[in-house]
Amino acid sequence: MLHEKTFPRTVASDSATRWIGHAQTFIAATGVVSSRSDDKKYKKDMLKLHGAGWASAAAMLAYNAYGHDKIARQDTANVLIPVYAVMAGLCAWRGFKEEEDLV
């Protein structure tokens, strides 16, 4: 996702990319595990937390693509930013929804 000209591919950058993927896998796993809970408040809190995470991911990607350094590819960011924003909105909506029918 980063520009090859600005950040040439190295062993360090490959390692960093793998660690980021590793961390993202654990974050996704928290959502999967929490979805199996019978505690509705816990589920709602996890949805709020994941909504905040998706929103911050959209903001960070926008900054990296269009901010000071422009280190992220803009064509990729143009696709991912709206996806992240939709995920943030859906998670937050279900997390803050007053309805008790959360499955």
Image (spheres, rainbow, N blue to C red):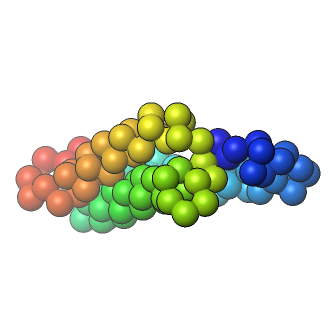
Please give left or right for residue 4 compared with residue 94 in the image. right
Please give left or right for residue 14 compared with residue 95 in the image. right
Which residue, as the protein is rendered here, is positioned at the far left? 99
Q: Residue at x 67, y 46 (%)?
A: 2
Q: Position of residue 88 (x, y in %)?
A: 33, 51
Q: Position of residue 93 (x, y in %)?
A: 19, 52
* Residue 23 vertical placement versus 14 (above, below): below
Camera-side residue: 37 or 70? 70
Q: Residue at x 55, y 56 (%)?
A: 64
Decide if residue 31 is in sight here. yes
Decide if residue 30 is in sight here. no
The quadrant holding residue 78 is top left
Which residue, as the protein is rendered here, is positioned at the far right? 11
Q: Position of residue 17 (x, y in %)?
A: 74, 50
For the N terminus, give its image quadrant. top right
Q: Residue at x 61, y 60 (%)?
A: 69
Camera-side residue: 89 or 26? 89
Camera-side residue: 103 or 22? 22
